[in-house]
Image (spheres, helix red, strand yellow):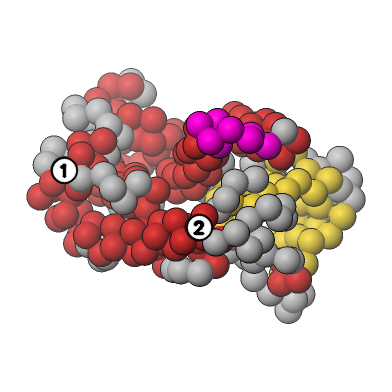
Amino acid sequence: MTDDIRGRHVAGPATVDVDRQRHPVHMALVLEGACRLRHHDGGLVPLPHSTLLIEPTHATIEVLEDARLGLVSFLSVASGPGLLEVTPGLRQIAPVDPALTRITEVVSAWVLAEPPTGTFARHIIERTIRDLVGGVILDSRLRPTSGREQSLYSAALHHIADHYADPHLGPESIAAAFNVSTRHLARAFHDEATTVTASIASIRVNVAAALISQQPELGLAEVSAKSGFPSLQAMRRAFRAGERPSPSAVRTLAARRHQAANRSRREPDGAGDDQ
């Protein structure tokens, strides 16, 4: 699909043994319908529409009838740190916004059907694909997995995910958005063994880590601002509080991965193969 990213679609009914693919499967996204992840030890995990899998191994993905699955491989990841290493705390199975899933599928399918030939077009499209893939990963980190989709806690998490960049985001503004008292909101989070403030910080850390991983060339002060932190120092404190590697450490790992991607572009062997 690009010099670094290999992608293909699988239509059901079909099975994909992730350990026997030509390129290692680093991402699998359920584009339509439902799939199942069957571990080689016999365990079975249902995968509804718009579910993202990160670096699945020792398993088979069963693509059910009328379902479609997207597979993505990164040459840079194959020759450098994996996604889970670069982005600590990333969930291996997580939901994704269906609209983002659809947009990613449409763009990817178009690129697979009609690859760009001009240098400028390749540059623009590669950047677009990278941004979409990064967006899928980021959205999967933000989207709550709570089974109680209509609960105040789940709704508030969605609100935080949509407004993390708002410098005024806090218990008061969230309570006002749902027409409840801050005490009632705090109880909903207490029932989940957390607090509103901690949840805001956690989501902002996830955003910052994803931004650094996708764009290691960004300055850390710019990352902190884009992630909703009031300062770079506040972002560093939040990383420490969450027992995460420092922003600088995350950037070092991401830079190594991007350097590996640049090396893969300069190596003609296999550059024209599509997964």
> What residue is drawn where x is 33% and y is 22%?
177
Q: Which mark is residue 266?
A: 2
Q: Please provide the residue range marked out in magenta.
A: 115-122
Q: CA distance from mark 1 to mark 2?
A: 32 Å
Query: Tag 1: residue type?
Result: Ala
Examine the rendering and report whether any part of residue 191 can be seen: no
Q: Residue at x 36, y 23 (%)?
A: 178
Q: Is residue 219 visible?
A: yes
Name the residue nearer the viewer: 261 or 99: 261
Left or right: 165 with respect to 100?
left
- Residue 268 sits in quarter: bottom right
Position of the N terminus, as image quadrant, is top right
Estimate the x, y position of residue 30 in percent, counting from the top left: 69, 46
Left or right of 45, for residue 196: left
Q: Residue at x 46, y 68 (%)?
A: 80
Q: Position of residue 200 (x, y in %)?
A: 28, 42
Which residue was labeled with disc 1?
221
Name the mark nearer the viewer: 1 or 2: 2
Q: Position of residue 261 (x, y in %)?
A: 47, 57
Q: Indicate the secondary structure of the residue bearing disc 1.
A: helix
Quarter of the picture containing the C terminus is bottom right
The three-letter code of the residue at mark 2 reads: Arg
Circle 2 sits in a helix, a strand or a loop, which is it? Answer: helix
- Depth check: give the residue in front, 81 or 143: 81
Whether tag 1 and tag 2 are in contact, CB under 8 A, the answer is no
9 part of magenta stretch: no
